[in-house]
């Protein structure tokens, strides 16, 4: 059997006495989209941040394409990486944040070219070519020279997605990419994410857009209280949830 692209093994994360992730194990095949749903505070962001070691897990291990992330194994001990060793691994995972986090003093294309140019060390022209292609993918090439503050939230988030793509990552992690947007701007961002999923990009998508998750994801995970309560096909987890907590969570989206 093929090894999964991403494997999360018994991941735990605590802040002091607060146990945020209790024991999470997941895997994702190449080319698949897993949607993660669940109430606020259930640990979704913390899980994504542990996957690329923006947060160091309290326990457990992350593997991408079979490679340990954030640490190496020596005998039966795990030795943590220094920040400098983490950078190349982080580039293999694009991260799309809820609040975009574009650099305000850089143009759109500079924002997108920055990682391949400055972190990966590509030639400047090549990095900018790559950035332009990424902007085309998100239908933002016409705004390449613009500054972020001149863009709508939906456009800024599409630039955020282009920035992730320009890293040429193995996987993209989306953390509620549309939840900071005005409702009329959500559609343009979801449509770009849908195109990427159709192309067979591997992704973990944390979202409250339940209908979208049902349409694009291959698997849906419902998290609550730092645990995976339920996972399976979208038609099961969203269509006919087995657990009371999943039903209760989903019921708020059917109202009105
Ligand atoms: P979600 O994304 O599902 O809303 P989060 O992962 O952001 O949930 O947060 C889960 C829990 O962890 C919350 O109770 C939050 O307050 C807590 N938490 C997150 N980050 C930190 C931190 N850096 N320090 C302390 N507590 C944190
Ligand atoms: Mg969150």
Image (cartoon, helix red, strand yellow):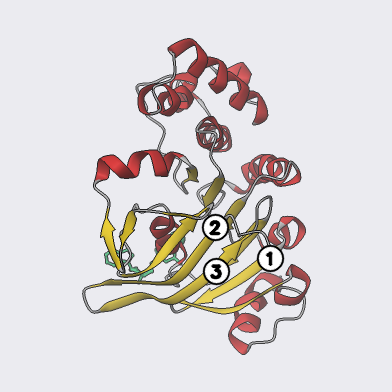
In the rendered image, the vertical position of residue 38 relative to residue 70, given as above or below: below
Between discs 2 and 1, the one toward the N terminus = 2
Instruction: Name the residue beneath numbered marker 3.
Output: 26
- Residue 85 is situated, as x and y percent measured from the top left of the image, at 30, 42
Q: Residues within 10 Å of mark 1 (few under 14, many from 20)?
A: many
Cβ of mark 1 under 8 A from ligand 1: no
Between discs 3 and 2, the one toward the N terminus = 2
In the rendered image, the vertical position of residue 158 relative to residue 245, given as above or below: above
Where ligand 1 lies, by quadrant? bottom left
Q: Quadrant of the N terminus?
A: bottom right
What label does residue 219 carry, if any? 1
Q: In which quarter of the view is residue 235 placed?
A: bottom right
Residue displayed at 71% across by 42% down: 191
- Residue 29 is situated, as x and y percent measured from the top left of the image, at 65, 58
What label does residue 236 carry, if any? none
Q: Is residue 146 shown left or right of residue 194?
A: left
- Point out the residue furthest to the bottom here: 244
In the rendered image, the vertical position of residue 74 relative to residue 22, given as above or below: above
Between discs 1 and 3, the one toward the N terminus = 3
Instruction: Name the residue beneath numbered marker 2.
Output: 6
Q: Quadrant of the C terminus?
A: bottom right
Residue displayed at 52% across by 50% down: 173
For the residues labelled 1 and 3, the Cα–Cα distance comes to 11 Å
Q: Secondary structure at mark 3?
A: strand
Marks 2/1 in contact by CB < 8 Å: the verdict is: no
- Residue 176 is situated, as x and y percent measured from the top left of the image, at 53, 54
């Amino acid at each position: 059997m093929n090894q999964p692209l991403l494997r999360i093994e018994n991941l735990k994360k605590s802040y002091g006495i607060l146990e945020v992730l209790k024991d999470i194990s997941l895997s994702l095949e190449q080319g698949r989209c897993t949607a993660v749903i669940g109430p606020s505070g259930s640990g979704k962001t913390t899980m994504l941040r542990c996957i690329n070691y923006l947060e160091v897990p309290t326990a457990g291990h992350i593997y991408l394409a079979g490679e340990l992330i954030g640490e190496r194994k020596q005998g039966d001990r795990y030795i943590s990486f220094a920040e400098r060793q983490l950078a190349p691994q982080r580039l293999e995972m694009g991260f799309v944040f809820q609040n975009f986090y574009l650099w305000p003093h850089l143009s759109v294309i500079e924002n997108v070219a920055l990682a391949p140019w400055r972190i990966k060390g590509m030639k400047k022209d090549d990095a900018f070519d790559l950035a332009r292609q990424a902007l085309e993918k998100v239908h933002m090439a016409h705004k390449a020279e613009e500054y972020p503050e001149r863009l709508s939230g939906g456009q800024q988030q599409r630039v955020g997605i282009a920035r992730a793509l320009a890293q040429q990552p193995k996987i993209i992690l989306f953390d509620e990419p549309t939840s900071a947007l005005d409702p009329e701007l959500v559609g343009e961002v979801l449509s770009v994410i849908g195109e990427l999923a159709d192309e067979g990009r591997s992704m973990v998508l944390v979202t409250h857009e339940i209908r979208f998750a049902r349409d694009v994801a291959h698997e849906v995970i419902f998290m609550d209280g730092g645990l995976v309560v339920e996972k399976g096909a979208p038609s099961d987890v969203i269509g006919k949830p087995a657990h009371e907590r999943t039903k209760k969570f989903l019921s708020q989206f059917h109202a009105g």
